[in-house]
Amino acid sequence: MTSLIHATAAELADLLSTGVVSSEEVTRAHLDQIADVDGEVHAYLYVDSDRALDTARQVDRKRQQGEQLGRLAGVPVGLKDAFTYMGAPTTCGSKILEGWYPPYNATVTQKLIDADMIILGKTNMDEFAMGSSTENSAYGPTCNPWDLHRIPGGSGGGSAAALASFQAPLTIGSDTGGSIRQPAAVTGTVGVKPTYGAASRYGLVAMASSLDQPGPCARNVMDAALLHEVICGHDPKDSTSINAEVPNVVAAAATKDVRGLKIGIVKELGGEGYEPEVLARFREAIDLLANAGAEIHEVSCPHFPAALGAYYLIMPSEVSSNLARFDAMRYGLRVGDDGSTSTEQVMRTTRGAGFGAEVKRRIILGTYALSSGYYDAYYGSAQKVRTLIIRDFTQAFETVDVLMSPTSPTTAFTIGERANDPIAMYKADLCTIPTNLAGNAAMSIPAGLGDNSMPVGVQIMAPPQGDDRLYRVGGALEALLQDKWGGPLLGTLAKEAR
Ligand code: GLN
């Protein structure tokens, strides 16, 4: 038997449902792994050991009593620290929320609980999900388990690194501009940004509300599908939640057939600025799909090169508004209140002390873009570009079923390399941002290694509510690649039993 930490979530689910192992054993194995390796990796901000074990025992009891349980019942999961979970601190990677215990559960959290999954703890992230390396966490960076000197991507670097170091079989992320997919790409894992509105944002600390989307992170496509099924679905508590049936992603992941499927390669997402080996792994993936019977077309999305610029106006504008709630009055940090200072002064001092540099940069940028004299020139123009990008996607999906590109232009860079160069950092999301602006669905899956032996990811994009197409193509491509490699990409690492 594969060791419990190296098993897939689907395998664990089978072992649990047939009574071969208990959830307590599975949970303990993961908690032991966290104790062994997280000192180095720093994927978790908070480990909820006692409650995880208690819940596991309760689930085992329910199973013994013959209760009908969900497929992932008893399977552990890590939760990005952007989601509220009663009884555990939610910091969103920021000092301003240090020690805050939320009085309610996010809908995603509640769905994990209702599915009898075991929440192991809260995973590290860039402060308020702003970043591509997890270096912006106020609690220190997460390291990439493939090479501890490199970044695990961001903002959800903790969720991705937990998977890649076998500290959880499944984790939850949130994706505003690529924070699920880019960490997946650079850690050799799978990450999915569902269609905007597919998973509820209720209880997800807001970064940019028109872009934020929770999604599943896993080590393979089927596991991601199983988690997708658990967390998605209509929620009246989120006014942008989709009120329609969730596409059958689990069936799609099992299809493993791309014959006749039309795949478009986005001309604008490649070329200059991309590492040659990233482009080479992408080409190889496309060739495998073509040999398996998919039709490959080159597609132009002429406005994609403007996506990064539009995103860095729209996102900070929403950030400046959303983060106004951290005012030292309602909850979180309060600094400088000695009884004689004015309310405004306390707010100023608290926000000055509680927010990191990147968060401040974006609040200032957004406030400027929204100011009356510049609104039309910046925010207004960016919204027009957003419409053009939506049109590019709509037109492309008239001729092809899915679009593909690399997930990120480069493999994992070293910690510190881009820390003082925000523009270089922003470029990590060149390929992922168009999808957030348009609100459609996208997935990253491992495509092999670069010359530096670091993972490369490829991205699959589908139209809104076409999430099942991601899983169909992703599942098929994963099987083709694993045939070639003789097993999962992370299998090699597993042998070293990190
Ligand atoms: N890296 C992007 C940013 O810094 C994406 C963040 C995200 O998806 N949360 O904005």
Image: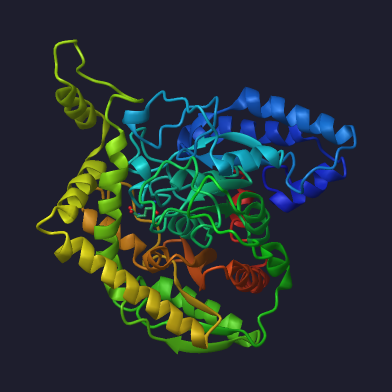
Q: Residue at x 36, y 49 (%)?
A: 133
**Residue 31 on image: x %, y %:** 63, 31
In the displayed structure image, the side of residue 76 where residue 381 appears, left or right: left
Q: Residue furthest left?
A: 373
Q: Residue at x 19, y 31 (%)?
A: 352
Protein image colouring:
rainbow
In the rendered image, the vertical position of residue 19 relative to residue 349, given as above or below? below
Q: Residue at x 66, y 50 (%)?
A: 230
Q: From where the camera sits, is residue 205 visible?
A: yes
For the C terminus, the quadrant is top right
**Residue 52 on image: x %, y %:** 65, 29
In the rendered image, the vertical position of residue 183 relative to residue 271, given as above or below? above
Query: Front-most of 99 and 195?
Result: 195
In the displayed structure image, the side of residue 171 where residue 24 appears, left or right: right
Q: Quadrant of residue 266?
A: bottom left
Q: Quadrant of residue 143?
A: top left
In the displayed structure image, the side of residue 305 where residue 410 appears, left or right: right
In the rendered image, the vertical position of residue 263 relative to residue 154, given as above or below? below
Q: From where the camera sits, is residue 167 visible?
A: no
Query: Front-most of 328 and 130?
Result: 328
**Residue 184 on image: x %, y %:** 49, 56
In the rendered image, the vertical position of residue 412 relative to residue 68, given as above or below? below
Q: Residue furthest top?
A: 339
Task: Count the numbered circles shown.
Answer: 0
**Residue 76 on image: x %, y %:** 66, 39
